[in-house]
Amino acid sequence: MSAWRNSVVAAVVAVLLASCSGKATTESASNGTEVAEEVLQRHTTTEVLVDMGTVARSATTHYDITLRNTTDTTLLLLDYEATCRCVWLELPRRALAPNESATLRLWFDSRGEWGTVGNYIGVTSSLDDVALAVWMMAEVE
């Protein structure tokens, strides 16, 4: 990735970080992470910023994101595209009825990464007018 692109990603993540942040857990940590519920709505892209905090080099961490379907239609999260192979999502394996919640898990593998890392993951759904954008940031030691 070019230095210019890294700068742009870091700047976008920094701007989003000012408005929202979260806590990440490592694989060996307890799963008692406090996570705010994100709302999926029609005619909009729901944006979620995940701050993984400081991550040791060659560590794998995850963050749970709770989503609630506030549309009037059953919704299925179909697929995602990430800017790096170092991040991936475990999507719910079931459809979400209106007002139903589900958890998706964001993973980050820091092997080969260093310094401030910022990635974007775009998630598509079964409804053309409902999308999810996940911005991830971490500081790799």
Image (cartoon, rainbow, N blue to C red):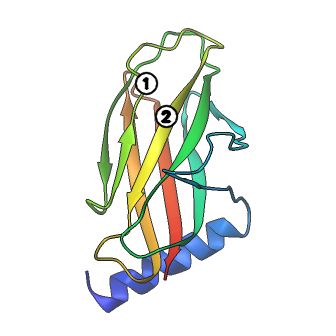
Quadrant in which the N terminus is drawn: bottom left
Total numbered circles: 2
Along the horizontal axis of the image, is 127 left or right of 37? left
Residue 104 tag number = 2
Residue plotted at (54% across, 32% down): 43
Mark 1 neighbour class, 10 Å CA radius: few under 14, some 14 to 19, many 20 or more = some
Residue 32 lies in what quarter of the image?
top right
Contact between marks 1 and 2 (CB within 8 A): the answer is yes
Please indicate whether residue 141 sits to the left or right of residue 4 in the image. right
- Relative vertical location of residue 105 with respect to residue 138 in this rendering, above or below: above
Q: Residues within 10 Å of mark 2 (few under 14, many from 20)?
A: some
Up the image or down, 8 lies above or below 32; here it is below
Q: Amino acid at mark 1?
A: Pro
Position in image of residue 37 (x %, y %)? 69, 34
Considering every residue shown, the one lying at the far bottom of the view is 3
Residue shown at 34% from the left, 77% from the top: 113
**Residue 52 percent across, percent down from the top left:** 57, 62
Q: Position of residue 66 (x, y in %)?
A: 61, 33
> Residue flagged by tag 2: what amino acid is it?
Leu
Nearer-N-terminus badge (1/2): 1
Which residue corresponds to the image point at 48% horizontal and 50% vertical from the top-left?
27
Q: Which mark is residue 92?
A: 1
Q: Picture quarter containing residue 99? A: top right
Q: Tell me: 131 left or right of 51.
A: left
Q: Residue at x 42, y 50 (%)?
A: 107
Per the image, label 2 sits on a secondary structure element best described as strand
Q: Secondary structure at mark 1?
A: loop
